[in-house]
Amino acid sequence: AIVGGFIYELLGVGGFGRGFWLRQQVVNAVSLVFSVLYFAWFHAAYAMATPGKMAVGIKVVRLDGERISFLRGVGRYLATIPSTLI
């Protein structure tokens, strides 16, 4: 009963306590992971662009015109985060 009560309180069912904060952090983390995977995968894929970039005919490439790697795509996405704070 103690563990069940702790989990119930931690998840904050029915309130804005600690559980609400924890749920928000989990949602934020999952959202970040999906965003990173989405952009990095599309930019590193054969098309070198997300669907929106494909619609307007632009690509993400290296200086030599080759595709970027998945890890470079991850780095590029994470580098955009500080610029959105300005």
Image (cartoon, rainbow, N blue to C red):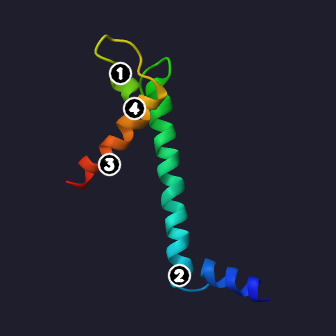
Up the image or down, 86 lies above or below 21; here it is above
**Which x, y percent locates residue 37?**
51, 39
Q: Which residue is mark 3?
A: 81
Q: Is residue 51 visible?
A: no
Q: State the CA–CA distance, disc 4 to disc 1.
A: 10 Å
Disc 1 marks which amino acid?
Lys
Q: State the CA–CA distance, disc 3 to disc 1.
A: 20 Å
Sequence-earlier tag: 3 or 1? 1
Q: State the CA–CA distance, disc 2 to disc 4.
A: 38 Å
Sequence-earlier tag: 4 or 1? 4
Q: State the CA–CA distance, disc 1 to disc 2.
A: 43 Å
Asked if marks 4 and 1 touch (Cβ < 8 Å), the reply is no
Task: Give the residue at the far right of this rendering.
Answer: 1
Q: Which residue is mark 4?
A: 52
Q: Which residue is mark 1?
A: 59
Mark closer to the observer (3, 4): 3
Disc 2 marks which amino acid?
Arg
Mark closer to the observer (1, 2): 2
> Element at badge 2?
helix
Q: Which residue is mark 2?
A: 18
**Which x, y percent locates residue 15?**
55, 86
Q: Which mark is residue 24?
A: none
